Amino acid sequence: MPCPAADPSGVSRRGFLKVCTTAAAAVGLPAWAGERMAENVARGKKPSVIWLHFQECTGCTESLLRTSHPDVGALVLDLVSLDYHETLFAAAGAQIEAALEQAMSAGDGKYVCIIEGAIPVAEDGAYCRIGGKTALEIVRTVAGRAGAVIAIGSCASWGGIPSAAPNPTGARGAPEVLPGKTVVTLPGCPANPYNLLGTVLQYATFGTLPALDAKGRPKLAYARVIHEDCPRRPHFDAGRFAQSFGDEGHRQGWCLYKLGCKGPQTHASCAIQPFCEVPGAWPIGIGHPCVGCTEQEIAFKIPLHTTIPIERPTGPMAYPGTAPARGEVSAVAAGVAGLAVGALLAGGFVASRQLSARADAERKEDAP
């Protein structure tokens, strides 16, 4: 299979395939889908991406830039055609506005619109004006002509920090200001880059989006709460908890639940997909409780070190925990949990079969 190798980015064929298959796995696709994504890129079929910035800290862009395997050159230049991105553009003013119009015209109805940051909707329109236009005007115009819309990060997904009370700017997430439009939400502060790449490449390769939950999140990436896959989970099951920062339990890596960890209710893949390919590069990995940044009802609303109930207890949580004399997981509850997991796996299998059939049909069409 032809594939970028010894180009200026210095990314090997193996490294290139690795990032494509990792991106595919992040949204629930099999390895062959990652290989197909790489084939499409090698043929020059790169998705056109228009990246908008509003109320945010640019953390999602920064995490993408620091994904090291492959480096930013491969990610930006080999996997997607990044036709508009304010942070990375050297141009400014009229030139960058012209670039936006050109990108929209060239890929009308096909490009991927990525939104980073909350959108202010205050009546006077005094906040976040770009080129004389309000953020709301820009996002509705650009997203309205896009083939796919992705909200990256918690700010774009549901408002994030800018929407915290009293929210003077009227900050909203993209789904709220784009009624009737399918918006893939990738909450996180920042969001994991592979969830983004998997979504974009699936759309570019197969013309589909990942299976989404009720909040618009890719089901596989956000199906499980962090608590279920946390490396400190065995200490929770054994009843070993850090009581304060710096105590003996904290130094030995015991469970951080009593210090306010929000992992039991936070849907994200941080525990199994490290940021920037650096093991332990996430809050729990460096000894701080999860803050629940992906969850609208938790982040910036519940005090940082306040404990929360455990959502959907699974098998191991039936062992003695913080309150062993109260409550247990019944056989009925365990059965329901098993059915839910089985349904999720079955759904992924069906989706894989559908994509496989579509890929076979496309290969026949491409054959001479």
Image (cartoon, rainbow, N blue to C red):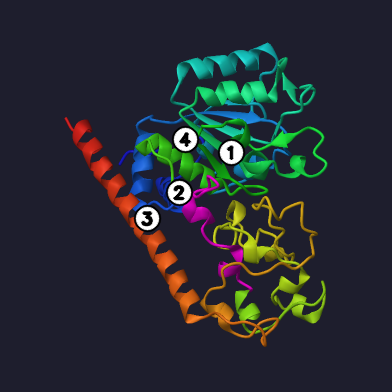
Q: Dot 2 lies on which element?
A: helix
At 67% across and 25% down in the image, what residue appears? 136
Q: Name the residue under label 4.
A: 78
Residue at the extreme bottom of the image, as rendered: 325
Specify the quadrant that holds the C terminus: top left
Residue 70 lies, in percent from the top left, at: 52, 45
* Distance (Cα) linking label 1 and label 4: 22 Å
User: What residue range appears in magenta?
Assistant: 211-232
Which mark sits nearer the N-terminus, 3 or 2?
Answer: 2
For the residue marked with disc 4, what is the amino acid?
Asp
Q: Does the magenta stretch include residue 214?
A: yes
For the residue marked with disc 1, what is the amino acid?
Ala
Above or below, 108 relative to 150: above
Q: Mark 2 points at which residue?
A: 15
Q: Which mark is residue 151?
A: 1
* Distance (Cα) linking label 3 and label 2: 26 Å
* Distance (Cα) linking label 2 and label 4: 12 Å
Single out the mark in the foreground, 2 or 1.
Answer: 1
Which mark sits nearer the N-terminus, 2 or 1?
Answer: 2
At 66% across and 19% down in the image, what residue appears? 91
